[in-house]
Every structure is written in C-alpha cells, then in structure tokens.
Image (cartoon, coloured by chain):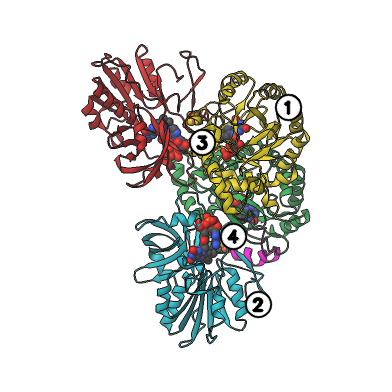
Chain colours: A green, B yellow, C red, D cyan
Amino acid sequence: MNRLATLLPGLTLKNPIMPASGCFGFGKEYAKLYDLSQLGAIMIKATTPETRLGNPTPRVAETPSGMLNAIGLQNPGLKKVLENELTWLEQYEVPIIANVAGYTTEDYVTVAEAISQAPNVQALELNISCPNVKQGGITFGTDPLIAEELTKAVKAVSSVPVYVKLSPNVTDIGEIAKAVEAGGADGITMINTLLGLRLDTKTGRPVIANVTGGLSGPAIKPVALRMVYDVAPKVSIPIIGMGGITNIDDVVDFLSAGASAVAIGTANFVDPFICPNLIEQLPAKLDELGFNTVTDLVGRSHRL
Amino acid sequence: MNRLATLLPGLTLKNPIMPASGCFGFGKEYAKLYDLSQLGAIMIKATTPETRLGNPTPRVAETPSGMLNAIGLQNPGLKKVLENELTWLEQYEVPIIANVAGYTTEDYVTVAEAISQAPNVQALELNISCPNVKQGGITFGTDPLIAEELTKAVKAVSSVPVYVKLSPNVTDIGEIAKAVEAGGADGITMINTLLGLRLDTKTGRPVIANVTGGLSGPAIKPVALRMVYDVAPKVSIPIIGMGGITNIDDVVDFLSAGASAVAIGTANFVDPFICPNLIEQLPAKLDELGFNTVTDLVGRSHRL
Amino acid sequence: MIRQEQMQVVKQSAIATNIFELTLTGQLVLDMKQPGQFVHLRVSDQMEPLLRRPISISSINEKTLEFTMIYRAEGRGTKLLSEKKPGDQVDVLGPLGNGFPIDKVEVGQKALLIGGGIGVPPLFELSKRLVEKGVKPIHVLGFQSEDVVFYEKQFQELGETYIVTVDGSHGSTGFVTNVLEKLEDDFAVYYSCGPTPMLAALEKLYPEKEGYLSFEQRMGCGIGACFACVCDTTEKIEADYVKVCSDGPVFPSGVVRV
Amino acid sequence: MIRQEQMQVVKQSAIATNIFELTLTGQLVLDMKQPGQFVHLRVSDQMEPLLRRPISISSINEKTLEFTMIYRAEGRGTKLLSEKKPGDQVDVLGPLGNGFPIDKVEVGQKALLIGGGIGVPPLFELSKRLVEKGVKPIHVLGFQSEDVVFYEKQFQELGETYIVTVDGSHGSTGFVTNVLEKLEDDFAVYYSCGPTPMLAALEKLYPEKEGYLSFEQRMGCGIGACFACVCDTTEKIEADYVKVCSDGPVFPSGVVRV
Ligand SMILES: Cc1cc2nc3c(=O)[nH]c(=O)nc-3n(C[C@H](O)[C@H](O)[C@H](O)COP(=O)(O)OP(=O)(O)OC[C@H]3O[C@@H](n4cnc5c(N)ncnc54)[C@H](O)[C@@H]3O)c2cc1C
Ligand SMILES: Cc1cc2nc3c(=O)[nH]c(=O)nc-3n(C[C@H](O)[C@H](O)[C@H](O)COP(=O)(O)OP(=O)(O)OC[C@H]3O[C@@H](n4cnc5c(N)ncnc54)[C@H](O)[C@@H]3O)c2cc1C
Ligand SMILES: Cc1cc2nc3c(=O)[nH]c(=O)nc-3n(C[C@H](O)[C@H](O)[C@H](O)COP(=O)(O)O)c2cc1C
Ligand SMILES: Cc1cc2nc3c(=O)[nH]c(=O)nc-3n(C[C@H](O)[C@H](O)[C@H](O)COP(=O)(O)O)c2cc1C
Ligand code: FES
Ligand code: FES
C-alpha cells in the first residue's frame, strides 16, 4: 500500500503534494531539475482563450516573509497550451490540473471545454480569484451568486472534475465555498493570493507596475490555514490547500486543518527542489506523528 | 514651526506616531522606559463597560514575520479605566485616543459617553473589528449598514471626535469606510488584525486557546498599506494607518499611501523603544526625501 | 530598572544534548538584582523569527559584568540563538519580572530547591545566594534522561543534590516527587521552577509550607503591557489574574490557579 | 546544468564603498561555461528576506573550484550577504541564463566592453576569455564617483581601459558615451552590461555593429517558470517577449525593447 496515495475526484495521486498554478509554468523548467513524475500532480499556469502578454514589469516585489506578484495571467493561450505544453507533459506520469482563467463566463467556458479534453488533464482549477486582472478575475470570486453561476456553466462543458480556486479577499470564504459546491464544484483549491501593495519609499511609487499585487509566501500561511480550517467542515467536497507552505510541518498543518492535498507556490522560487523534498520527507513525518497514511491525517484537527 | 505637527479632528499631535491599541496597555509599563509625553498620542487598550478577563491562554503565537493574538479584550472595565488609568495618564502631555469595545450597541454607547468626558481623552477609536470575541466585535465591522448605525449611535453621545477602526477581513474595505463616514465618523483607523490560525504540528491542536487569533506584524504590512491606499481617495476624513510598521520607511510608506498619522502595534514587543526611536528618526527622513513637513508627505503616492 | 542593550557573547557551549550555556556581558548585568528574573532576547536582526524569547538568568557575575543563561535549543528562535559565537551581539531586554525572595529564609535554616528540566537554571543563582547568606540548600533536580542532565557538579558544590530521571538513566528513577516523598521536610521554604504539573504536585505535597514557584507562559511584550501571559488566580489574592512577565514569573505558592 | 549547492565562502572583502567581492567554492563551478551567466543566491536560512538574489558571475576558476562575484550591498539581502565570513555556507542556484558569446569575434579582432557601475563585474570573466582567445578587448567602464570604482587595475592588465565617472572624481568626466564618441570604432563586436538607459544609448550609438547586452529585471524563480522577468521585444525576433532569467540575461542588440 502507498501511504501517501490520495484519491480525489478525477485525481489518483501518488502523493498529496503538487506545485501551485503560476509558480511552475508548464513544468519545462523544473523538468530540467528533477523527474516530474515524482509529483502528486501539476497545477499548470492559468490558461486563457487567447495569448496574454500580462502586466508591465516590475511584476514581483519582496515583502516580509512573502512576495507580491502581478504577472497578469501571461500565457500562450489555449491553442498553444494544448499543442505545445500539454502534449509535452504527456511524457510524464503525472496528472495535470489545468488552471482556467478569463474575463467573461464565455472565456472560462471556452477554455474549460477544450482543455478538459486533453488526455492528461484530469481536473480543472477554475481561477476565480486572480487579483491581478482589472476586469473579471476577482469579482467572480467575491460574489457567491456569480461564483455559483460560473461553476455551473463550466461544469456543464467540462469532461473532467472541476475544482474552484477561492480568493481570500472576502468577508466570508465559507459562503463562497458553499456557493461553488452548490454550483456543482467537485473540489475546492484555496487560497489564492491576498491583495497587497508595496511602495518604493524613496519615490512613493508602487514597486509593482500594476500598483497592487498578490501576496503569497510564509507571511500568509496563518490566513490560509484559518480559511481551510473554516471551510473544511462546511463543505463535503475535498480541499487542496495552499498558501505559504515551505516545509513538511506546513504540509502537516494544512492536512490537519482539513485539506486532502496541498500545493506549493512561492516556495518553489526559494528552493526549486521543494516539492520532491517534501514528498520524500512525508513518510518519516507520518511515522513521527504516529499516522499510517496521509488520509488518516486529513482533518485531524477537527476530530480532537 | 514643528515639522512633525499633525492636526486631526480633536487631536493636536506633536508628531504623527503613536502606539496602537492593545499593544501598549494604558501606558504604565512603557512609562518606566521613556517619557510618554514624547508620543504623538496614545491609543489605550480597548475598554468595555465591565471588567473583562479575556480568553484562556495561550493567547499569542508567533508566525512568519508576524504573530497571532487572541487576548479577548481583557481590561479592567470602564470605571477602573477612568479612575485608575486615565487619571494616572493625566501627568503626561499626550492626547489619549480611547479604544471603545463591546458586544452590543449599548455597550459601545455606554463606554463612549462616559470615557469621552475624561479630560485627556481627545478622541475615541471605535473598535468594530476585534476578531477575537465570539459575538459582536467583528460583525460590526463587516457589514456596512451595521457599521454606519453604530457610528451614528456613538457620535450622538460622544463629547469628542470619533474614529472608527476598520477590519481587514472584508471583501471591500472602501465600502465600510464610506459607510462609517456617512455615519458621521471624524476619522478612520486601519487596519485591525487579519484572522489567522496556527496549529501545533505535533498534536494538530490550535496553538491559541481561542483557536483563531488576529495576525499582526510585518507580515501584514502589504495588506494594510494596500487598504490605506485604497480607502484614502474614497473618503474625505483622515486616516490613522497601521499594520506591520517596524521602521521609518514603513512610516513613510503609510503616510505616502494617504494616512495622516500612524500607529505602531506589534513592533513595541520587538523593540520597546520603537515609538520614540521612530519619532526621532522622522525629521532626518523628511530631509532625505526632500519634504519639509509631515503634512507635505501625506498622500504623495496619489499625487504622482 | 529595565533596559535594552546590545550585549556581547562571551562564550557559548553545549552542556548536554541540545542544551546550551550562554554567557553575555554588558552594563545591564548591574541591574540584575534577584535570582529568578529573566531576560527577553532577540535572536535575529531580521523580522523572522519576530518575537523575543524569554530566558531565565542562571547566574550573575557583577564583577565581570557577565551573566549566564542555560536553554534548550528547540524551536527556530533558540536554534538561532545557539549559533551565536563569541563577539556576536545579542539584543537583551531586562532584567524582567520578580524573582525568588531570599529574605523569606533565615541564616542557618534549610531551603528546598526543586527544578524540572529546563526550569533548573534560575535555581543556580538562587542557590549561590542562599549559600552566601548562610542558608543550607537542598537540590532536587528532575530530568528526562541522562543526556539532558546538566550542572550536577555545580549544584553539588553548593549543597545536597538529588538527581532523578524519568527513565532512570541517571540518579534515581521517576519524578522529583518520588525523591521528595522520601526526604525530611525540615526546610523553611521551598523554591521551584519547572513544568506546571510539577509545580501543582508540589503545592499538593507541601500544603502547609511557604513556597515560591516560577511559572511559564507565552509572552508578547514581556513587560506587562499586552496581557498575553496572564494566569488565573485562586481566592488567596484579591486580583483576578496575574501577569507572569511583570507580576511573576515567581509567585508564592497557592496564588496561581494550576 | 542548473544545480543547487551549499557553497562555501572562501573570502569576502570590501573593494569599494559598499561594494564587495565574494568568492565561493564548490562543484557547481564546473558547470559555469559562459561569461555573463549569473547565480541566484539565498542570503539567509530564515524566511526573511525570502527571495533569492540574482548576482552575476565575475570570474571563474575551474582549477580551484572557485568563482567570484562583485556586488553592491544596498538592500536587506545584499547587506546580509556582505556579512558572510570564510567558512560560512551560501545556498547557490546556478549557473543560470545565457551569457556573452565569445565565438562572435575572431582571433586578432578587437572587442569593445562597456560596463556601467555594478554591471561591470560580468565583463571581467568575458575579458579574460577574449584575451585567452587572442581577441583584443577595449574596456570603457563608467561609475558614479571615485569611491565606487573597482577592478581598474585588473581590467588594465587585460587591455586598454578607460574609466569615466559622473562627477569626474576619477578618470574622465561624464558617461561612458562621452568616452565612446571619441574612440575609434574599429571593433568587431561590443558587449555591455549596465543600467538600461546606458544599453539604449549604445544601441543608438552603434546601430550597425553587432552587440550583446546584458539586462536586469526583478526575478522570482530565476529559471524561467514564473514570468516575472519578461521584457518586450522588437520586431527583430518573432517572440513577443523574452525572459531575462532563462532567455537572457544577455541578448543581441536590438532584441529587447528599451
Ligand atoms: C519566564 C520564562 C523563563 C524561561 N526560562 C527558560 C530558560 O532558562 N531556559 C529555557 O530553555 N527555556 C526557558 N523558558 C522557555 C523558553 O522561553 C522557550 O523554550 C522559548 O521561548 C522557545 O523558543 P523557540 O524559538 O525554541 O521555540 P518556537 O516554537 O520557535 O517559539 C515560538 C514562540 O512561542 C514561544 N514559546 C515557545 N515555547 C515556550 C515556552 N515554553 N514558554 C514561553 N514561551 C514559549 C516563543 O517565545 C516564541 O514566541 C522560559 C520561559 C519563560 C516564560
Ligand atoms: C541577471 C542579474 C545579474 C545581476 N548581477 C549583479 C551583480 O553582479 N552585482 C550586483 O551588485 N548586482 C547585480 N544585480 C542586481 C542585484 O540582483 C540586486 O542589486 C539585488 O537583488 C538587490 O537585492 P537587495 O537585497 O540589496 O535589495 P532589496 O531591495 O532588499 O531587494 C528586494 C527584492 O528586489 C530585487 N531587486 C532589487 N534590486 C534589483 C535589481 N537591480 N535587479 C534585480 N532585482 C532586484 C531583489 O532581488 C529582491 O527580490 C543583478 C541583477 C540581475 C537580474
Ligand atoms: C508568481 C505567481 C504567479 C501566480 N499565478 C497564478 C495563476 O496563474 N493562477 C492561479 O490560480 N494562481 C496563481 N498564483 C497563486 C498561487 O497558485 C497560490 O495560490 C498562492 O501563491 C499561494 O500559495 P504560496 O503562498 O505557496 O505561493 C500565482 C502565485 C505567484 C507567486
Ligand atoms: C496583543 C495585541 C492586542 C491588541 N488589542 C487590541 C485592542 O484591544 N483593540 C484594538 O482596536 N486593536 C487591538 N490590537 C490591534 C492593533 O491595535 C493593531 O491594529 C494591529 O496589531 C496591527 O498593527 P501592528 O501590525 O503594528 O501590530 C491588538 C494587537 C495585538 C498584537
Ligand atoms: S507578556 Fe505582555 S503582559 Fe506579559
Ligand atoms: S524569474 Fe521567473 S521567469 Fe524569470
């Protein structure tokens, strides 16, 4: 038996650890460093219907124990992602979770329908929480009704299970979670970045050309963990948790709080080998904590 | 002319730097370290109608570049605050901003009416954003209508200007800001803490007895700064900014983003002399940046 | 008076598994008046780890302006602290709190000092001062196992010393209470620092004795301003609560609800 | 191949005001093939500062397994880096990116190397390799003022070297372009690293020449995955954008929109 195995709608994971969307491109760069087949899954970069060039630079800024980014969903567009990226990824034995983005319901539906048919795409991740695009993006993630409607529309066309990625920039994330569950979501991924700002103290100008950016990294872990802990008992669909994970204890914390699997974003930039390292460390950590399988650990904080 | 002088409703400040509520008690402890008359003002600990013993311990936990707290508004209650604390503070030439808390509108009104009559209380800070009390507290801060009504009720009884302290745990902080302005608020203080959680990895239990706590410190600075930058152009009342300030550059950033003055919370625990140190450093910083007065600096990021 | 000072590392060494002895020097030593007080340390100039760490003063040397701490490197902060080398600076806030009163015991009397694990260090300066005064200390020191026992000799030089380990790998086996039950109770006062269950057991064992117990709590400010470190009290005192950092860490037995 | 290695500090010294020369040793040096590549450094084991810092490789010594960087200690990260002492470890990711091609210039030809401030370092290894190959380098190095000039002698030993400072406190006065305008343009290729306005001026000055320019951008991953470091391109190439970290940092002149 594989102690790390994790079964989720559409996803048979060797282990519950995967890179988060936007922090791993389409895998090519990290493939030069290690074998991608080790990963539980890969959440690929947000894909939009057309090529997107993203925001002006600077696009990143460092903050205390965190960073801001405003990449602006730069990606080669649906067609090229299907032809060049997903095809290339087929050489690895790793399920792909395709991050779907757009400005209109149409956009989401177009991408979802096409990309869900790629042979290695086993689930979609609806990105209704990108804080870095002016229209759309975030509004889909902050209004429960709109979120529910969008989920329904995408579910209607997707050939694979649909996970919805929630924004932390809301008053009540539980409400949004319940709305997307009602809309038919098969799972939830959370959290996307917190909206933040850094100013250049000398000039008073925003460091990031887009003015605001999304805050990620260890700084946000307490917020992310609180939200997973809050949402888990309110929904009956599984959660893939993320936000500031940098070490094996963080992985355990998210699983304890109720996430069935976890994703690693910013930490890939600090340590490009973080995902395989954490996968390797997980069995010993289970032993230390006295758990047989990852599944046993999931949600333990709610059972105490 | 005093380059640091800052004029706000009810407050004639020698300088724009003051300790934040809950991080400075009622001043007695810090008075042993330095002369409190140096401070721009003092935001005293939240006061409720009756004595409150607060939450069980542990009440604090460290997080990456931040901390969680769930003190639970422990305070000696209105009567003792008036008799022992405020009277004692009269020996210092420093305006007091009294942080007012409660569970019901009644509570707020009772405290506001009485405490606003203390001779050295020159403004109130309505704490509608405490994340650490089960009922009340945060709900007042997340619903614009309720926030507006509460502001009105307090304004009706207060003998001094009323500042409302906003919660960052909302979808649209601008909306709440406009609501309290409409309710008659004379100023805004922001931000209170972000709701967060830390788990003990070994046991899976929350580190903080209250389960969740409020996240403060450098980790939240990008979020706080973004919110000040967002709210400043939307209201015509002044803002006292706070959230993660630890050095003079942070002070400049909050002023640039549109705050008229700043408050220092968590950093007092790291460096108990932080407030007088920053006050001392501010004139040289103004010189370096080419500004004559603090007032010149306020909101410069919006004028670029 | 509480002061903040960049103090200099004189020496640091591992004296047991993960247990370090760290000596700092600076003017602040002159303000250290009482055994059982503590200091609040920054372990890094960076913003992470953010909070100070409270560590007890283990011995004081006014002449050389040095003081020594003994601590367990466990979490991020104490691990960083254990990497400090002679000549490095450490930001110290202190001395903090109220320590063990030595005026409660007369010349010629006996005092019982009970330490548990990493609660042992503050008892060392206490014992030295008691001996100086002409009081006879009896030390009962409990540890998990042999590899984390420290300062056995140093305490022996000051008086009768019993070591007890949970696993019996050194000294007798069990808890300090197993030793205490066999000791005569002809002491005037007892002093203790260690895990709360141990302190509770002592209060039960010596209900009639005068005792002084040092408590631990998570801290924010360390100086009494933030209300992080409060403990509930018993009916014995009027106050509803006490703060470990500024009212304690040492309280008369029976005051803190355990 | 890109590798991650805990490399050891061999030496570090200040060579001008706030400018440090840092030499590290480790196996990773064997993978450094091209002048102009860079490494991505962690400056602390803690979570703050969080991100790696990109620093150019300034010289490479395969025999001793050492390489040297020259950097300005400016912000939090580089200041921490400047505190590293011999024997300390530094987490290095590298070598990264594509450097200056030396096969574009023939034996006996001249190459013009133009550096601006903290862009000067990667030109040093480049110049050494050109000289080794039998190419004659001409160095034009611009700095703010005398106190931040470095490596003047080292460059002089390799070839003709002109120093220019903005305030005229050392060498001639003004910008590199003031020197360049007076130089003969009998070089085959020019190579440059420095502030973007300087690179733009060079493209204008030598529209007909083959040139290779090294660019800077804020970085996240440093390996091409995060899209933080993109630059717009001109019509000269098909791609809409390039990534400084993995497509660059060196690009042929005219490729990046400046
Ligand atoms: C008055 C007092 C005196 C102390 N004296 C000593 C001593 O002499 N030697 C010694 O080894 N330890 C002593 N401790 C305990 C010591 O403070 C903690 O072991 C230490 O703070 C843990 O820090 P860390 O970086 O290893 O752990 P982390 O887990 O990184 O700490 C995270 C946070 O929790 C706090 N924390 C964790 N454990 C404790 C604890 N047991 N008590 C209080 N805060 C804690 C830390 O201060 C920090 O804010 C004392 C505690 C108090 C309150
Ligand atoms: C390919 C490349 C090669 C470089 N080579 C050198 C070199 O050889 N010597 C040298 O002194 N400098 C070099 N730099 C610039 C160097 O990376 C920055 O000076 C450094 O990252 C600033 O870090 P800090 O901690 O001092 O500043 P902070 O202000 O603390 O940095 C905050 C964040 O901004 C980034 N940042 C700040 N300034 C720059 C910048 N100019 N370029 C890219 N990122 C920046 C930092 O990496 C960090 O992520 C190079 C940059 C690049 C992109
Ligand atoms: C540079 C960068 C780019 C990102 N791009 C995307 C994206 O395209 N789609 C998405 O859903 N999330 C994106 N995110 C958010 C991450 O997937 C993740 O939700 C967030 O960063 C929190 O996790 P972390 O703290 O581990 O980074 C991006 C994050 C970063 C730092
Ligand atoms: C220990 C602690 C106690 C606090 N108590 C209060 C309080 O009683 N009333 C209040 O309005 N805010 C309270 N706050 C919030 C602070 O005033 C401040 O808004 C917040 O901590 C952000 O600032 P900082 O990052 O500088 O700490 C408290 C914060 C801390 C850390
Ligand atoms: S630690 Fe702040 S009151 Fe004790
Ligand atoms: S820094 Fe990530 S793509 Fe270049």
Residue at image mark 2? D236
Residue at image mark 3? B61
Q: Chain of mark 4?
A: D
* Helix, strand or loop under label 1: helix
The residue at the far front in this view is: B1
Q: Is residue B251 left or right of residue D60?
A: right
Viewer-nearest of discs 3 and 1:
1
Circles 4 and 2, Cβ within 8 Å, touching? The answer is: no
The magenta span reads A70-93
Distance CA(mark 3)–CA(mark 1): 34 Å
Q: Where is residue B92, by image quadrant? A: top right
Viewer-nearest of discs 4 and 2:
2
Could you say which disc has been placed on residue D218 in the image? none
- Vertical comparison of D174 with A219: above or below: below
Q: Label 3 is placed on what type of residue?
A: Ala
Q: Under 8 Å from ligand 6: the CB of mark 2?
A: no
Q: Residue at x 60, y 81 (%)?
A: D206
Distance CA(mark 4)–CA(mark 2): 24 Å
Circles 3 and 1, Cβ within 8 Å, touching? The answer is: no
* Helix, strand or loop under label 4: loop
Distance CA(mark 1)–CA(mark 4): 50 Å
